[in-house]
Amino acid sequence: MSEVYFLKIKKQSPKILAEAGKKISKVFSNFFDSGDKVAIKLHFGERGSQTYLSPILVRAIYQKLQKKVEKAALVDCNVLYKGERSFASSHKKLARDHGFGFAPILILDGEKGDEEIKIKINKKHFKEIKVGKGIKDFNAILNISHITGHGITGFGGALKNVGMGLGSKGGKLEMHQAFRLEINPDLCQGCGTCQSECPVKAISIKNDKAQIDYQKCIGCGKCISVCPFEAVEIPWGASSAKDLQERIVEYAFGILKQRKTFFLNVLLNITPQCDCVREKQKPMVKDIGILGSQDIVAIDKASLDLVGKNYFEKPGVDPSFQIDYAQKLNLGEKDYKLIEIK
Ligand code: SF4
Ligand code: SF4
């Protein structure tokens, strides 16, 4: 049974978050050594998002960690869709604008997202995976995930932050290839909202109905979230949502093997969509706190349990499938003991 540490936070303020960062850092104080080079993986938040990870919290964690280890930096990789987070220079600027300029910031797959290393894994979907090249300079990862819902996988936690997050652009494309959305013509009103929101212009309106160009679609799921008539569907019985979850988990497997890893899941501002959404979102539930564990499976299971699985379910999507698959790959175990930090 794995240990998951739990720091309750009912209300947020800069002071409370700074204190919380110091407190939660105690759970990994004996885990990292003086010779470790630690990549702190996080999502800096898309422009317009207001509920991304608090830089005050991350700064407090970074300050504790960097005193202990040889090197620590905040890292992420570029995204597939067009925007500030698709190039390293604008990605870093956005991170600084969002308050993360207190530490070195590295975008591991380079300026255009094409600098990658290949890691052999020999799993069901992938023989090898494509990961941001800069990860080779780190022997350890401290993964800080903001718990949110997600358009396709239902739930976004540590598995997704590592697996999808550290894939190069080529890697992200491979993961998304599992995925094919459909427009329900009976529900589509031809309003064009999905067309204007699609980051790669994959949607056109013909005869008052939306159509997806699958050659262009990168599977970001944004059209599902923005459609006011719930006309964008993951086909019932289709394996696409499960396939995507399996692919993300296989990436996490490859990235985590042979590296020291510790996980923090932040259950604050828990929104229906992830921090790639360029708009203000309303949290689905009250703030819960922060979890810490060495076990990526246990920490995601505990996060799902504490929020409530029902908040992440959608037709055709079981949000816990990724956790089951990760256990199957021996990434960790679902059985956990919650230990409250006072
Ligand atoms: S947002 Fe929904 S209703 Fe509007 S065009 Fe797109 S699929 Fe159709
Ligand atoms: S999932 Fe939807 S919004 Fe995203 S790229 Fe494909 S068609 Fe566009």
Image (spheres, rainbow, N blue to C red):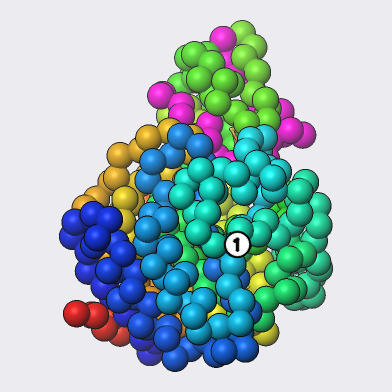
Please tell me which residue is depicted at 66% across the width and 81% down the height of the picture. Answer: 139
Please tell me which residue is depicted at 46% across the width and 56% down the height of the picture. Answer: 156
Please tell me which residue is depicted at 51% across the width and 76% down the height of the picture. Answer: 66
Residue 214 is inside the magenta segment: yes
Residue 144 is inside the magenta segment: no
Per the image, the residue denoted by label 1 is: 104
Please tell me which residue is depicted at 46% across the width and 26% down the height of the picture. Answer: 227
Q: Which residues are magenta?
A: 208-229
Residue 248 at x, y percent in the picture: 61, 61
How many neighbours does mark 1 have within 10 angstroms: few (below 14), some (14-19), or many (20 or more)? few
Tell whether 167 sits left or right of 102.
right
**In the rendered image, the vertical position of residue 274 relative to residue 247, given as above or below:** above
Task: Specify the quadrant of the image occupied by residue 84.
Answer: top right
Residue 185 at x, y percent in the picture: 53, 21
Say whether mark 1 is within 8 Å of ligand 2: no
Tell which of 32 and 202 is nearer to you: 32
